[in-house]
Amino acid sequence: MGERPGKPEASACAPAVSSRIASIDALRGLVMVLMLLDHLRETWFLHVPVADPVDARTTLTAVALARLVVSLCAPIFISLTGVAAFLFGTRHTLSETRAYLLKRGLVLMALEVIYLSELYWGVAIPTLWLQVIWCIGVCMVVLAVLIGLPRPVLLAVGLLIVCGHNLLDPIHLRPDQPFFAAWAMLHQRDVIALPLGLVAKTTYPVLPWIGVIVLGYAVGPWFLPEVATRTRERRFLALGCGMLVAFVVLRLANGYGDKPWFVVEGDALRTAMSFLALTKYPPSLLFLLLTLAIGALFLVALERMRDAPVVAALAVFGGAPLFFYLLHLTILRLLYHGAAAIWGPTQGTVFGVANYGWVLAWYVGLVVPLYWPTAWFSRFKAARQEIAWLKYL
């Protein structure tokens, strides 16, 4: 998509943001640390299935709670990707920003297909897992096309997608129908048959996430230098509280925005679990309202705590998120295959632990060791900015 005649370059439209914003890095780091817990469950506790949304009548309470917490990861990270794209554009021309988003998006998509998918081979038929990294890559490519639009149009597009995509839920295509593959990638979580005996599983249908990254880009101006910190905090506080109110009202109505919740007779805890059991694949309107609301409130809290050591530690993870993602998934798969080779299947056809407490123990044991290589890479990346390919990691 070419630039329209007479349109000013992005760097001329707003003052450049020259330094990293600690609260953004810290919030991104927080979701990366939370993500580790979900991936540990998928490594050691995958024999205990977790439905989407969770079944409040049968799911272990600890698993349901952990699932709710880690649900914050993808919405917050993808919305911050949109914010980061805007901030990148304050230091580069519109053409440079588009080129970066396109290249970074294609790199992420290639990483998912060429490297991350293969980590899971050996335990299932060869599958291309089109998961969150693929999804972010596609979103960045789409955003590269859209960023030339006026901000009000971007807001309208993002809101229309996020708020309206559940109207498309009744549309289900079969593999033998036209456009099945495209629809499976956009909105219908499914399996696509590929040549050579491969299949692709569209774990993260991308349409709602495109809305999320566009909305993140649209709020990017709130981080410009001329916006006072207190003003930004008030805006995100109002936004977060407003989304929470909208979530509660819509969820109580039990109509549009997700599958209905229900009362579990004599069990208030499981009734609450049902109320908070939300669809992630693809993310429902209510899922996004709740998780992005919490993300907005976390951002305010982290801005107010910006001098605290914990914020600096989280910012390390957030400063090198892709490195941390690749590192911890690689380590977890090596650990899994090593354990499976030594002890064999312990839970049906897979290796696993019998108690979820062991998942939590692994989580506590891995967070700190993973901090040090991530901190090293973050410092290396900051010090070697002349290495062009580093900016894509």
Image (spheres, rainbow, N blue to C red):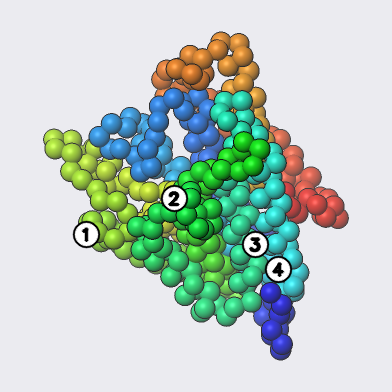
Q: Which residue is mark 4?
A: 98
Q: Amino acid at mark 1?
A: Ala
Q: Of marks 3 and 4, which one's residue comes earlier in the chain?
A: 4
Q: Of marks 3 and 2, which one's residue comes earlier in the chain?
A: 3
- Which circle, 1 or 3, is nearer the viewer? 3
- Which circle, 3 or 2, is nearer the viewer? 2
In three-dimensional space, the C-alpha distance between marks 4 and 1, rounded to whole angstroms, equals 41 Å
In three-dimensional space, the C-alpha distance between marks 3 and 4, rounded to whole angstroms, equals 8 Å
Q: Amino acid at mark 3?
A: Val
Quadrant in which residue 56 is drawn: top left
CA neighbours of label 1 inside 10 A, class few (<14), some (14 to 19), many (20+): few
Q: Residue at x 74, y 73 (%)?
A: 95
Q: Of marks 1 and 2, which one's residue comes earlier in the chain?
A: 2
Above or below residue 307? Residue 270 is above
Q: Residue at x 60, y 75 (%)?
A: 226
Mark 4 residue element: helix
Q: Which residue is mark 3?
A: 141
Residue 370 position in % (x across, y down): 64, 33
